[in-house]
Image (tube, grey):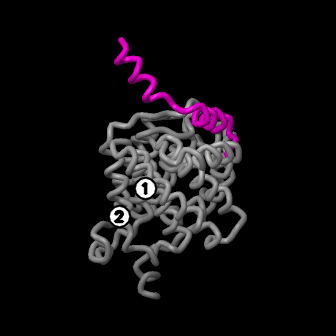
């Protein structure tokens, strides 16, 4: 009994980390950052706080993307990456550190221009596949974040936005794959069918597939998922951004392959070669 009690104490979250979860569920991103920044300043070796801070910084970058230039967000993502790396070292069996380092690197790529960051694609993919291989299980009460749902989301976006031309494999050892993208987003939606971001991203991936492969059924299904996502509540800051962007996505659906919450990307081979 004493051993079981010790285990429960060892894995209990610090009160400040619990408070950050409460604030996150309430949609208070500034509050999350305020609490975690103060706590991590005096407790730099708490991996549960560190990966949540990395996530919060990433999400803050998503909000700031709507109002400030891309280059001004790069230090935010660089710091999130460093914090996530520390979380990995402190708790290598948790998938969260790998997930959020990859997320930070992914946003460094989109904020810098994906075609200028192609050599990092295999590193990002490796981090997310490593995360997926861990036994981590997590879900916010609000459903805004979950594990492995967040990894499905990350991989789905990766395989849609990563160029799929053959030269890409020579540059980085990996390439995009729209069928993999759709697969991971279907897994995300199955994990939480009421999470608006998952429905939105599945819709985007299906529209991308529809236009890439002239697949009318994929286009129809993609529009359905986007409309379903639009109908869901959107109280969290990133969900509110998605809600505003869904009509824009539908108006530019032929460009869905290049959609990103922080901007649209041209990942064609012609753009890479300067065509």
Secondary-structure class at tag 1: helix
* Of 261 and 111, the residue lying toward us: 111
Q: Residue at x 52, y 63 (%)?
A: 107
Q: Residue at x 61, y 43 (%)?
A: 39
Q: Is residue 12 left or right of residue 130?
A: right
Residue 216: percent from left, percent from top = 44, 55
Up-down: is 145 above or below 10? below
Range of the magenta residues? 1-29
Which disc is residue 85 wearing? 1
Q: Earlier in the sequence, mark 2 or mark 1?
A: 1
Could you tell me how far apart the alpha carbons at marks 2 and 1 are, in whole angstroms? Answer: 13 Å
Please give the residue where the numbered disc 2 appears in the rendered image. 123
Marks 2 and 1 in Cβ contact (< 8 Å):
no
Q: Is residue 147 left or right of residue 260?
A: left
Name the dominant secondary structure of the magenta segment: helix
Which of the 4 quarters of the picture holds residue 147? top left
Number of residues whose C-alpha sits closer than 10 Å to that of mark 2, classed few (under 14), some (14–19) or many (20 or more): some
Secondary-structure class at tag 2: helix
């Amino acid at each position: 009994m004493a051993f079981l009690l010790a285990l429960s104490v060892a894995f209990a979250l610090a009160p400040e980390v619990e408070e950050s979860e409460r604030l996150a569920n309430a949609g208070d991103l500034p509050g999350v950052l305020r609490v975690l920044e103060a706590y991590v300043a005096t407790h730099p070796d708490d991996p549960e706080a560190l990966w949540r801070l990395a996530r919060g910084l990433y999400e803050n970058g998503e909000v700031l993307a709507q109002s400030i230039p891309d280059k001004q967000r790069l230090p935010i993502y660089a710091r999130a990456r460093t914090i996530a790396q520390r979380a990995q070292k402190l708790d290598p069996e948790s998938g969260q550190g790998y997930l959020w380092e990859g997320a930070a690197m992914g946003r460094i790529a989109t904020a810098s221009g994906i075609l200028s960051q192609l050599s990092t694609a295999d590193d990002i993919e490796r981090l997310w596949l490593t995360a997926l291989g861990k036994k981590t299980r997590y879900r916010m009460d609000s459903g805004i974040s979950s594990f492995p749902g967040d990894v499905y989301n990350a991989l789905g976006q990766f395989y849609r936005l990563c160029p799929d031309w053959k030269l890409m494999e020579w540059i980085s050892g990996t390439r995009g794959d729209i069928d993999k993208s759709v697969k991971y987003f279907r897994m995300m939606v199955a994990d939480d069918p009421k999470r608006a971001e998952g429905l939105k991203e599945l819709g985007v991936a299906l529209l991308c597939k529809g236009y890439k492969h002239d697949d009318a059924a994929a286009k129809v299904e993609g529009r359905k998922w986007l409309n379903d996502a639009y109908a869901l509540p959107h109280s969290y800051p990133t969900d509110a951004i998605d809600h505003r962007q869904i009509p824009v996505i539908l108006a530019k659906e032929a460009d869905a392959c290049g959609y990103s919450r922080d901007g649209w990307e041209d990942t064609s081979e012609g753009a890479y070669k300067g065509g």
